[in-house]
Image (cartoon, helix red, strand yellow):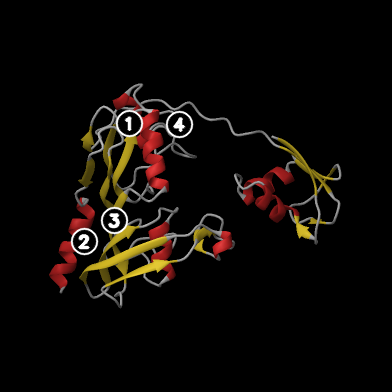
Amino acid sequence: MMKKTQYKGEPVRLDKYLAGLLEDHTRSFLQKQIKEGHITVNGETVRPSYMLADSDLVMVDISDPVEPEILPREMDLDILYEDNDLLIINKPKGMVVHPAAGHTDDTLVNGLMAYCKEDLSGINGVMRPGIVHRIDKDTSGSLVVCKNDRTHQALAAALKEHDIKRVYVGLVSGNLRDDEGTVTGAVGRSQKDRKKMAVVPAEKGRAAVTHYRVLERFKSCTYVEFTLETGRTHQIRVHMANIHHPLVGDELYGKGKNSLGISGQALHARTLGFTHPATGEWIEVDAPLPDYMKDALKRLREKQ
């Protein structure tokens, strides 16, 4: 990628300016590119901390990342529903949905390519064939996969209009005060840690609404049902952490370590429902609770 820009404004760090300009790249990546001389100011190599002045000419010359070849891999997929247009998978905890750094041959996409062969929509390219929405690596549960572009486009539109029913269950730290409630707050990239999302001012994020209902109370945590009105990145995790009840096991937004020995957020995408684009019928499936969560609930109940 070759980009030339003339800075206008008050003095600002070069790496900070570029992080806002090139949002597809992390600040650490850009810092590395500056140090290696791929990004210059007024034709000179500088440090990431260089303070840009009005009219400085910034030249960016970095290579676009090369997409790795994604190969099919036989997997024992837990299929909850399937027809000629789509299938719904019960994704296990610990599985990455689509290829990314460090995961190119062990993702759900690799398994889908082996199972569906050529019958996967291509709208999201070679890295995310068939994938309309995703759930985090350590979140388990229902995920819809499209076999053709027509179905993909219809479900993507339904997702955008909030016409897809998505209900999660999870364990949160502490005891929620109310039996049910709604958490609102725009979700956007954290300014303190680019790896995290956060509740941010409306103009800096995307509107997000999470409804919750207490299913069961325990001494140290609460078993909760969540219904998504919107579907932002890490939405439930961010919203619950923001009201001081992070998900049990959440290493990014909570303490991570817990007495139940749960690694990664205790969150499960239980229910997925939508109008089938081809038939017009309502399709709704429930993914069974994963064993680790059933075991945790059993132990918590025994301690009551």
Mark 2, secondary structure of its residue? helix
Sequence order check, earlier mark of 4 and 3: 4
Distance from the alpha carbon under mark 2 to that under mark 1: 29 Å
User: If you read the primary sequence from the N terminus, does the residue marked by circle 3 or circle 2 appear first?
Assistant: 3
Label 1: how many residues lie within 10 Å, few (<14), some (14-19) or many (20+)?
many
Q: Position of residue 151 (x, y in %)?
A: 35, 33
Q: Nearer the viewer, residue 144 or 117?
A: 144
The image position of residue 139, as x and y in percent, is 33, 51
Mark 1 → mark 4, Cα distance in angstroms? 18 Å
- SS label for mark 1: helix
Q: Which image quarter: residue 171?
A: bottom left
* Disc assigned to residue 168: 3
**Number of the label disc, if any, that sits on residue 111:** 1
Extreme residue toward the bottom, this view: 177
Image quarter of the C terminus: bottom left
Q: Residue at x 41, y 42 (%)?
A: 157
Q: Which amino acid type is shown beneath numbered disc 3?
A: Tyr
Q: Which amino acid, mark 4? A: Ile
* SS of the residue under disc 3: strand
* Mark whose residue sits in front, 1 or 4: 4
Please name the residue that numbered disc 2 is placed on. 296
x and y percent of residue 181 in the render? 32, 71
